[in-house]
Image (spheres, grey):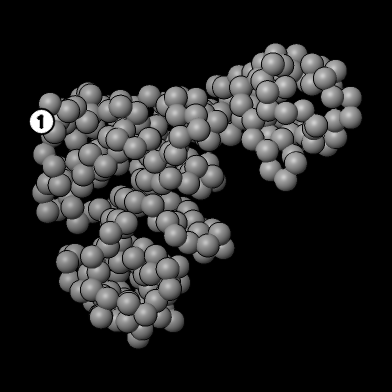
Amino acid sequence: MEYAIRATGLVHRYGKQVALHGVDLACAPGKLVALLGPNGAGKTTLVKLLLGVFAPQQGSVQVAGGDPRQRATRQAIGTMLQISGVPENLTVTELADLFASLYPEPLSRMSTLGLAQVDDLARRRFGQLSGGQRQRVLLALALIGQPKLLILDEPGSGLDPASRRALGELIRAQRERGTTVLLCTHDLEEAARLADEVVIVDRGHIIAQGTPRELTRSLPERRVYCRTGLSNADLERLPGFCRVSFTDGSAEILVRDTNAFIQALLTADPALEDLSVAGASLEDAFLTLTGTVNKEPA
């Protein structure tokens, strides 16, 4: 089988600091894979190895069937990074023509702009575009070489919910056309919504890999929603309690033993209202697996 991404035994060090500890990763063609991990987990180092920016210090890496340090392989990769470096004084048309010149068989300019739904912006200068428009143009530039692998770094960063969802649908459409997509994101909701598979990196190791449902079903936790007069301290004393957050008087409680917790909750607060129970989320899986409860994911 030819993998879209195949990494074996990757080790990378910065001096005495080990960023990757023997990472093995295999991604099948045509999948949308979300890469998650806390700050300093090794995600950026892994992406740089996949892009051929770094040579493996130990182990091997293949992308789209080749060595990412070779030009022919790099031409099979489309990249949309947080820091674009795109000249802001060029028009969208000029940027498309510039990027097309880098590939042996690029899509036509109008085909590319149409795929990303930015053909109406063709004459606008990049520096004049809104955040959502810029992200869609950058996606168009990443697609112009007809990549087998599309690497996206925080594509929804800074966008309003509507723009982020629209961009997500454009990304999903590329997966449906057969392009493999590696999505690096802080947005766990976005990852759960878009990804076929999730890879979680922590301290230089891949600690979990599977579909969003597989990762969340592996957790014993459930979410309990209610309106209660109990305090945080009161809830902490109930059996099975993990953590709680309050929003406008409503509690969202993560628990391990749902039955025991709810029985104790109803006894402690007979005036309880709006009780409901839901399964754990991808965010819960991320926080549990990485041990970053109450810390900012990255």
Q: Quadrant of the N terminus?
A: top left
- Amino acid type, label 1: Gly
Left or right of 3 on screen, residue 73 = left
Residue beneath the point at 32% across and 77% down: 127
- Tell me what residue is drawn at x 38 percent, y 35 percent: 37
Left or right? Give the position of 110 relative to 52: right
Residue denoted by label 1: 15
- At 30% from the left edge and 66% from the top edge, which residue is drawn? 141
In the image: residue 226, left or right of residue 112: right
Picture quarter containing residue 35?
top left
Q: Is residue 99 visible?
A: yes
Q: Residue at x 25, y 69 (%)?
A: 86
**Residue 112's x, y, as percent?**
35, 70
The x and y percentages for residue 232 are: 68, 27
Res 10 → quadrant: top left
Local secondary structure at mark 1: loop
